[in-house]
Image (cartoon, rainbow, N blue to C red):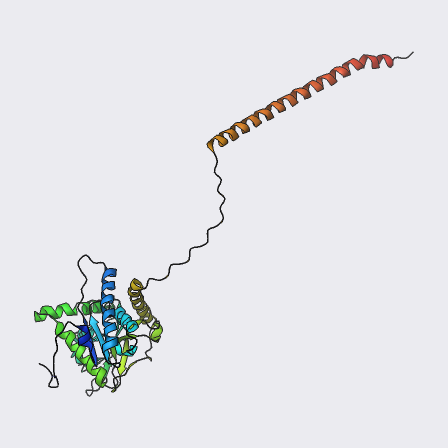
């Protein structure tokens, strides 16, 4: 099964020896989440594993080495961490595999339209390749569709128009793609690892020799701000690859508001993984306001209450005394008036 140009195979557990002078490196992420291991702990363990690889690759591999990551772990985050820890390697030379998911989606579309999956082209995978992704059919076209309109092999039709079932595309399609790997294993009655191997082989062939002219494929790469994805965030994008092996993100895709919203959701998922390693800073604690605290001794409080009662009592007594004085004053004035009246009358008689 090996290619005729294969010269030698070296099996080693020494990563320094494995990466020495490499032109191409394929990192197969074989780490799996343990039964009682939390998602965050698994992400941290996976990142630590890939950071070690990155540091050795940075020292031992050729400076123009091409590194392809694949697996079931946090691939996008692992690519980001490898780029950060391998400064001697151009960041565009460390990428991730989208082709497995892309091929599964093409297979589902081909089955739906009864065409060969190889005739399904320009299907785009956005987002976190092993997490929140969005499979975009807006640019997807099909060759060899047996319909009312047909033409030469180069003739193609829009997949969305041929499917013509929005509910299926929004719901059932996504579930079918997710279960495609398991379905393949059930049909073949053995592991579907060859589908990943085929995806790796075609990706590396395109990276070395270029993609077919006019066709779009997907690749996990570090963003430079394309489609409002933050810079340096690693995301799956639509790309073409030149015959010299330089990939380029396709930037003229018109997106509907619905597609933009789906991509934003996928980006949030990528950021959530990144936040496990780089937690966002907590908001600053507001300065404490000045609060006067008065501690009252229960005895003082009781004395205060007793004083208030005594004051009330004195006030009432004073009020009563004032009333009595007023009454006595009024009576004395009245008596004085009575005593003065006879004298006044006698003085009033004529002589």
Identify which residue, 13 or 233, lies in the foreground. Answer: 13
Q: Is residue 106 visible?
A: no
Q: Residue at x 80, y 15 (%)?
A: 340
**Residue farthest to the right?**
351
Q: Position of residue 77 (x, y in %)?
A: 27, 68
Q: Residue at x 10, y 68 (%)?
A: 186
Q: Is residue 42 visible?
A: yes
Q: Which quarter of the picture shows residue 13?
A: bottom left
Q: Position of residue 158 (x, y in %)?
A: 25, 79
Q: Position of residue 168 (x, y in %)?
A: 22, 69
Q: In the picture, which quadrant includes the C terminus?
A: top right
**Residue farthest to the bottom?**
152
Left or right of 279, for residue 346:
right
Q: Which quarter of the picture shows residue 277?
A: bottom left
Q: Residue at x 73, y 17 (%)?
A: 332
State the count of labels: 0
Q: Position of residue 217 (x, y in %)?
A: 24, 79
Q: Is residue 237 above or below residue 283?
A: below
Left or right of 72, for residue 322:
right
């Amino acid at each position: 099964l090996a290619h005729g140009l294969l010269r030698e195979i070296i099996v080693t557990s020494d990563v320094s020896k494995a990466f020495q002078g490499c032109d191409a490196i394929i990192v197969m992420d074989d780490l799996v989440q343990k039964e009682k291991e939390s998602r965050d702990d698994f992400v941290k363990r996976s990142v630590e594993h890939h950071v070690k690889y990155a540091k050795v690759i940075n020292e031992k591999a050729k400076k123009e080495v091409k590194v392809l990551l694949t697996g079931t772990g946090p691939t996008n985050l692992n690519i980001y961490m490898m780029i950060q820890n391998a400064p001697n390697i151009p960041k565009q030379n460390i990428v991730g595999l989208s082709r497995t998911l892309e091929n599964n989606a093409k297979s589902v579309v081909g089955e739906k339209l009864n065409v060969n999956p190889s005739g399904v082209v320009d299907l785009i995978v956005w987002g976190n390749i092993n997490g929140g992704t969005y499979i975009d059919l807006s640019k997807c076209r099909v060759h060899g569709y047996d319909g009312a309109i047909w033409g030469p092999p180069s003739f193609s039709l829009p997949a969305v128009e041929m499917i013509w079932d929005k509910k299926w595309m929004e719901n059932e399609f996504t579930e079918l793609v997710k279960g495609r790997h398991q379905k393949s294993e059930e049909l073949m009655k053995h592991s579907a690892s060859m589908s990943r191997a085929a995806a790796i082989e075609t990706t590396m062939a395109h990276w070395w020799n270029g993609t077919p002219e006019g066709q779009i494929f997907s690749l996990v790469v570090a963003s430079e701000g394309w489609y409002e994805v933050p810079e340096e965030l690693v995301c799956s994008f639509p790309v073409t690859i030149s015959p010299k092996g330089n990939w380029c993100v396709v930037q003229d895709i018109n997106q509907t508001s619905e597609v933009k919203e789906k991509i934003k959701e996928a980006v949030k998922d990528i950021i959530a993984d990144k936040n496990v390693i780089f937690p966002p800073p907590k908001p600053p604690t507001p300065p404490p306001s000045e609060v006067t605290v008065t501690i009252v001794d229960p005895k003082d409080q009781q004395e205060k209450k007793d004083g208030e009662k005594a004051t009330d009592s004195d006030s009432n007594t004073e009020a009563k005394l004032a009333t009595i004085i007023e009454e006595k004053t009024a009576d004395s004035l009245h008596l004085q008036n009575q005593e003065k009246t006879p004298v006044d009358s006698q003085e009033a008689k004529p002589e």
